[in-house]
């Protein structure tokens, strides 16, 4: 089915619906538009498969919100803000900021709200907890520098002070990354967060082979948002067909015993950490080399995760292989 618009509407309609409609015919100062393939998006609504996927993706997030007392009205206002933000920054035409009217039509948010929210967004800044910003750099150096590692690539315990361990000390590590902050301040905070511990010889030991605080809600919330965003962004890019496709793979099985899960969880941790340490070491060296060039800079994330949950009692495993690698 086609819809006919007069020639005077052309520029306006192309601005409002750059992805929903396409021009297929010009004649007698008229332009014919047709809806795009329903497998991607259409004026009739999103594909059912996408709706099912979104419900699954949002379920654990809703669980977190309910556990933290976030209500639907609060989320609705948050989503309204986010719809306006994404429409304004990622759906531009010829690199020009969209008008309030276009954002309103794209998002369904009232034009008056669009204007208010855009003003609020202009005054908002994303804050990274100080301990995360510095901590990520310190752990990257600790895990990516040969002198701080055992032969198997695991992090060495470090003496607290340079007077005790020289270069192989926590004090030297901190000074090498940021000489304006005392190592004692960092150590106290990391002990509070559970990132490090002190062993029987009073040496500083990294509790995990990556910077993942076991305490400190703000710090954990930062990584919650960072890691989920980048994983979802990679998957969204691939779903939308943007090329080149990004790495986003997993292995799934649904008929395993608890003993088997324990073995696979251990294997996943060990294999995953080897991969993370190898990529971190290479990225640290490359970043130092790239700092001397004028090439445009980019950020990257490489992640590993493992998840398990009980299968419903009514589930019956089919005969044969119940797993998949995707």
Image: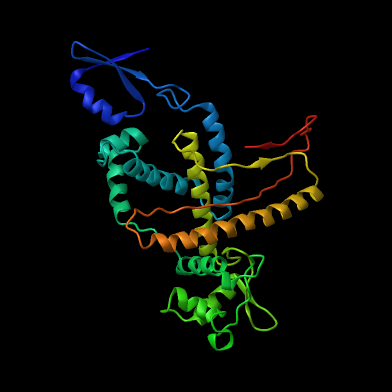
Please tell me whether residue 221 is drawn above or below residue 320 in the rendered image. below
Locate the C terminus and report the quarter of the image it occupies: top right
Q: Is residue 105 left or right of residue 76?
A: left
Q: Position of residue 153 (x, y in %)?
A: 63, 65
Residue 110, quarter of the rendered image: top left
**Residue in the image at 42% along x and 24% along y:** 42
Residue 67 vs residue 282, the one in the foreground = 282
**Residue in the image at 27% along x and 36% along y:** 93
Please tell me whether residue 56 is drawn above or below residue 144 in the rendered image. above
Residue 28, quarter of the rendered image: top left
Residue 194, quarter of the rendered image: bottom right
Q: Is residue 69 left or right of residue 6?
A: right
Q: Is residue 221 left or right of residue 92?
A: right
Q: Position of residue 259 (x, y in %)?
A: 81, 50
Q: Position of residue 273 (x, y in %)?
A: 63, 58
**Residue in the image at 42% along x and 79% along y:** 179
| Observer able to see residue 17 | yes
């Amino acid at each position: 089915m086609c819809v006919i618009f007069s020639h005077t509407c052309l520029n306006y309609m192309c601005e409002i619906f750059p992805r929903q409609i396409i021009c297929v015919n010009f004649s007698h100062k008229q332009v014919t538009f047709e809806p795009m393939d329903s497998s991607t998006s259409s004026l009739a609504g999103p594909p059912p498969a996408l709706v099912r996927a979104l419900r699954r993706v949002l379920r654990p997030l809703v669980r977190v919100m309910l556990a933290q007392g976030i209500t639907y009205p609060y989320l609705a206002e948050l989503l309204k803000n986010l719809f306006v933000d994404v429409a304004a920054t990622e759906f531009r035409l010829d690199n020009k900021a969209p008008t309030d009217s276009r954002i309103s039509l794209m998002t369904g948010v009232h034009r008056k709200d669009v204007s208010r929210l855009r003003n609020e967004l202009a005054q908002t800044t994303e804050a990274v907890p100080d301990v995360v910003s510095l901590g990520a750099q310190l752990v990257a150096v600790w895990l990516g520098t040969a002198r701080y590692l055992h032969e198997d690539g695991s992090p060495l315990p470090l003496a607290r002070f340079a007077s005790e361990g020289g270069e192989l000390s926590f004090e030297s590590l901190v000074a090498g990354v940021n000489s304006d902050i005392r190592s004692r301040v960092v150590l106290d905070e990391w002990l509070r967060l559970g990132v490090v511990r002190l062993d029987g010889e009073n040496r500083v030991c990294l509790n995990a082979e990556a910077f993942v605080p076991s305490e400190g809600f703000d710090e954990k919330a930062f990584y919650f948002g960072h890691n989920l965003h980048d994983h979802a962004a990679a998957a969204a890019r691939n779903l939308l067909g943007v090329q080149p496709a990004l790495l986003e793979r997993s292995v799934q099985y649904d008929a395993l015993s608890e003993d088997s899960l324990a073995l696979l969880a251990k294997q996943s941790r060990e294999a995953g950490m080897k991969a993370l340490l190898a990529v971190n070491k290479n990225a640290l060296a490359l970043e130092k080399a790239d700092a001397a060039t004028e090439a445009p800079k980019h950020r990257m994330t490489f992640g590993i995760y493992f998840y398990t949950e009980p299968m419903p009692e009514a589930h019956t495993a089919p005969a044969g292989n119940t797993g998949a690698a995707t």
